[in-house]
Image (tube, rainbow, N blue to C red):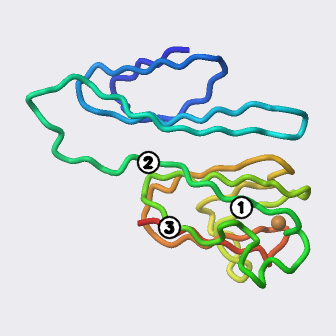
Amino acid sequence: MTFVDPDNAMGSWEFSGNALAVHTMHTNQFTVSYSVSATATAGETVELEEEIMMEGKETMMEEETMMAEPTTIHVEIPVGTSVPGCEETNSCFSPADITINAGDTVHWMNVDTAAHTVTGGSPADGPSGVFDSSLVMAAATYEFTFDEAGGYDYFCMVHPWMLGSVTVN
Ligand SMILES: [Cu+2]
């Protein structure tokens, strides 16, 4: 699989294979984030994540602005959250309240045996429409990239005691 995209320097792509090569036509530094998923046994997913920095040749022109490179933040949907109790320790999502930078991606992993949702909004006001995983089955994942700064409450539509928040700077 080869991407040649002169207009878009950024993107997110899924592919299957066992090798990854990345290069740029420019000489500026750039960062590549990649994650590797492999199914170890049925129902169990192993996920590895690394970040590498590719360095281009020295140039006379320095990049003037360097934004923090987008990263992925991991949140677990813990075992046992389909019955009330986790809300007493604010642990229905783990961690329940996170702060990230605009452009970062939050990756939710359901390690519970029950299906859950990650739905923007609150039980009182309903879904915000900003993001909604729909049902995330056991051992499944959901991710969303937050491009806009702001505060985002979210909850589980199946178990409305399950609350979390993402603060985007
Ligand atoms: Cu739930």
Above or below, comparing residue 64 to residue 26 in the picture: below
Residue 64, position as x, y percentages in the image:
16, 45
Residue 52: which quarter of the image? top left
Q: Residue at x 33, y 23 (%)?
A: 6
Residue at horizontal 80%, vertical 32%?
39
Mark 1: amino acid = Val
Query: Which quadrant of the rendered structure holds the N terminus?
Result: top right
Residue name at image x 77 percent, y 80 percent: 87
The dot on residue 99 is 3
Residue 51 lies, in percent from the top left, at 48, 38
Mark 3 Cα within 10 Å, few/some/many (few <14, many 20+)?
few
User: Does 38 appear above or below 75?
Assistant: above
- Tell me the SS state at disc 1: loop
In the drawing, does residue 117 fall left or right of residue 165? right
Give coordinates of residue 43: x percent, y percent. 89, 40
User: Which mark, by number, is residue 70?
Assistant: 2
Q: Earlier in the sequence, mark 3 or mark 2?
A: 2
> What percent of the width, then of the height, locates residue 147?
45, 55
Instruction: Give the answer, above or below, for where 21 lies relative to 12.
Output: above
Q: Which residue is mark 1?
A: 118
Quadrant position of ligand 1: bottom right
Q: Earlier in the sequence, mark 1 or mark 3?
A: 3
Going by the image, does 59 lie left or right of 144? left
Residue that protrudes farthest toward the left in the picture: 60
Spatial separation of the CA atoms under disc 2 and disc 1: 21 Å
Check the picture and name the quadrant holding the C terminus. bottom left
What amino acid does circle 2 point to? Answer: Pro
The answer to whether 89 is drawn above or below residue 121 in the figure is: below
Q: Amino acid at mark 3?
A: Thr
Residues at marks 3 and 2, CA–CA distance in whole angstroms: 13 Å
Distance from disc 1 to disc 3, alpha carbons, whole Å, reads: 17 Å
- Disc 2 crowd rating (10 Å Cα; few below 14, some 14-19, many 20+) is some
